[in-house]
Amino acid sequence: MSSSRAAVSTEHGSSPPAAGTGPLLRGGAILLIAAVVLFGVCVASLAIGAKSIPMSEVVAALFGQGDDSVRVIIGDWRLSRTVVGLVCGVALGAAGVVIGALTRNPIADPGLLGVNAGAALGVVIGLTLSGGAMGVTGYTWFAFAGAGAAAVIVYLLSMIGQATASPLRLALSGVALAAVLSGVTQLLVFVDESVLDSFRFWRIGSLAARDLADVVPLVPYVLGAALLALVLCRALNALSLGDRTAVALGVNLGVVRFLGFIVVTVLCGAATALAGPIAFVGLLVFHIARYLVGADYRLLVPLSMVLAPTLLLGADVLGRAISDGGPVPVGVMTAFVGSPALIALIVWSRRLGAES
């Protein structure tokens, strides 16, 4: 039985999830360490910037005490920036893992299924209707609508001629739809100069210029989708072994993939509306988490939710620290940091595989 299960797993390019309490305990320890690192990065996000602030003054400012200028910097700028990074990081981390499970594709990311392209088109439509004057709170719902419409179209396209959506068809449909939606987005931006000005800043990807009032309405949606991703962990483990094995284990493929699409749609829509399309976070974190804890989605999903905001906030802090003028947008930093890190991770994994 174990040999046949391993054979099925090898056929689909993934190893079976680890069994027993030992790997779970080790994964729990890694998760705890990652949470401590995330806390340290959050502290750095509050303290480091164009003006470095001692921790004693940061704590005082959080409680409404201390110097007025420090309270403005912490309360009005850095706190909201840190919260946006946390929310977007959790969303991108969970979405990246779920997409990887749905497509069984090691290079899957939120852009692969066309969800990010749909959210971007929704934002541009909102900006076009408002003449470029719509704020984050307004076009958030356009981002949700665009992401949802793209997810539905991809899901329906991948099911043409068969009962369920296969991973290959999901990926191909997503790539094709993303190209079409990106073309429509560029056309709308090109013909309306007022939209171009707003879209150009949003398109880079940034945690700045977002108030806590913009974030709070999205928190319940992100938390709900993240919890649903955690609930799906056991089904995702079965899905990673292949469709036939998953069905034999009692998994309803259609339901799991449909719920997975809901998770990806909500998380990508929220993150894209708040910070713009940020590359590499979901993809890189998926590989790092998989290297640390293996293929068990009971560990992969929560660890990715911790690692992604760590990466996102760390890149944002680095962008503030290295710039003499205005901070480098986090979308630029994640591209600079993420691409070489991903290449190094792939090379390292191949070397370890060759040695073993």
Image (tube, grey):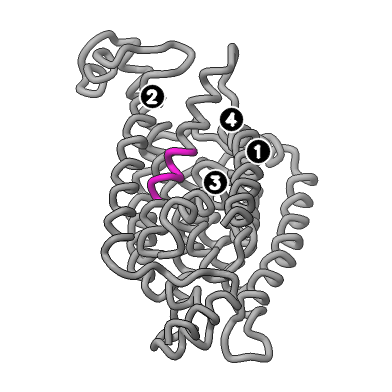
User: What is the number of the mark on residue 281?
Assistant: 3
**Residue closest to the eye, 61 or 338:** 338
Q: Main secondary structure of the magenta part?
A: helix
Residue indicated by mark 4:
329
Mark with earlier residue (2, 1): 2
Residue 255 at least partly seen: yes
Mark with earlier residue (3, 4): 3
Of badges 4 and 2, the one in the foreground is 2
Mark with earlier residue (4, 2): 2
Question: Element type at marker 3?
Answer: helix
State the quadrant of the C terminus.
bottom right
Span of residues in magenta = 305-311
Mark with earlier residue (1, 4): 4
Say which amino acid is labelled 2: Ala
Residue indicated by mark 2:
44
Question: Which residue occupies 26% across, 18% down?
Answer: 61
Label 1: few (<14), some or many (≥20) within 10 Å? few
Quarter of image, res 301: bottom left
Above or below 354: residue 61: above
Residue 277: in magenta span? no
